[in-house]
Image (cartoon, grey):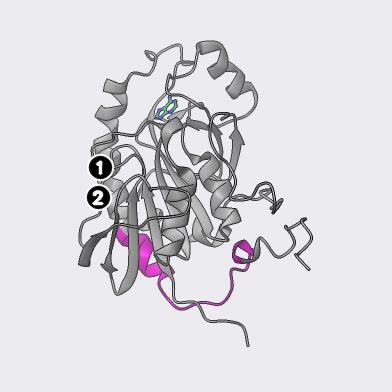
Amino acid sequence: MPETITPMIGFIGGSGVYDLDGLEERRWVRVSTPWGEPSDEILTGVLSGVRVAFLPRHGRGHPTPPSALNYRANIDAMKRIGCTELISLSAVGSLKEELPPGHFVIVDQFIDRTFAREKSFFGPGCVAHVSVAHPVCPRLGDALEAAAREIALPLTRGGTYLVMEGPQFSTRAESLLYRQWGCDVIGMTNMPEAKLAREAELCYATMAMVTDYDCWHPDHDHVTVEQVVKVLFGNAERARALVKAVVPRLGAPRGPCPAGCDRALDHALITAPEK
Ligand code: ADE
């Protein structure tokens, strides 16, 4: 008999998304991990009868920059508290004319250009190579798409998210290069988050929320924090509506993930087991 899983939906909120409203049994919980402390306490509660958890990625008040986030602790803490799926809500810049500020993108690929972060739960003594060929869970993508269409968000399904180290924004040459690579949006956080979610055998998907045209667009000023923040709060409001629409679509007891996200380690360990 395949296992029946009662989902707990985890949300990781990026810039502008520091809380979730409408939860019953609302409680901020401190979770420690062997990897250190996550960005903040985790908000737990019940939404439409479904258990949910929420972690503000940068901490409440946004004290932690992208390179200093403890991504391993964040993912591990969400797993320890019981999450079975993770949805990342992330502010991004746009690399395409047709993805203007205020647009939402359910990305399905990433290019990881980060270099100053711990990226794996594995290391000397126990080596694993998980596949991230398809880093996003299509079941979560379907649920996000249906929910976004229900609340009439301007939406694109599919796209490549270039993850840069930051904290500075890109140079114009970099921005133009990423456009040549066919990337759609750019941000600073979804790697190594997506890789670690896969190692933790959690289903993962991203709703990217466009705040700016980065610095490539001839008709728009280069991105500034002021501009990002201006668009961010409108996006964050709609992200909260999206959470309310998506949770009921994912809450029913289910079998194993059809895409195998929850079995990612089955064929990934290369270190011989101890005799
Ligand atoms: N987050 C929001 N806008 C961004 C941009 N243009 N570059 C990197 N991260 C971002």
Q: Which residue is mark 1?
A: 60
Q: How far across and how far down the image is residue 185, in percent?
A: 50, 32
In-front residue for pair 214/170: 170
Find out whether the residues at labels 1 and 2 contact each other: C-beta distance under 8 Å.
Answer: yes
| Residue range corresponding to the magenta coloring | 244-262
Give me the residue at 21% from left, 56% from top: 21
- The quarter in which the C terminus is drawn is bottom right
- The residue under label 2 is which amino acid type? Asp
Task: Look at the picture and state if 242 lies above or below 107.
Answer: below
Say whether residue 249 is magenta.
yes
Q: Quadrant of ligand 1?
A: top left
Position of 96 relative to 42 (above/below): above
Residue 212: image location, x then y, percent: 38, 26
Farthest residue, direction front: 275
Please give the name of the residue rendered at 51% of the width and 45% of the height, measured from the top-left corner.
Answer: 193
Q: Quadrant of residue 192?
A: top right
- Checking the image for residue 269, the label placed there is none
Which residue is labeled 2 in the image?
19
Q: Residue at x 38, y 61 (%)?
A: 246
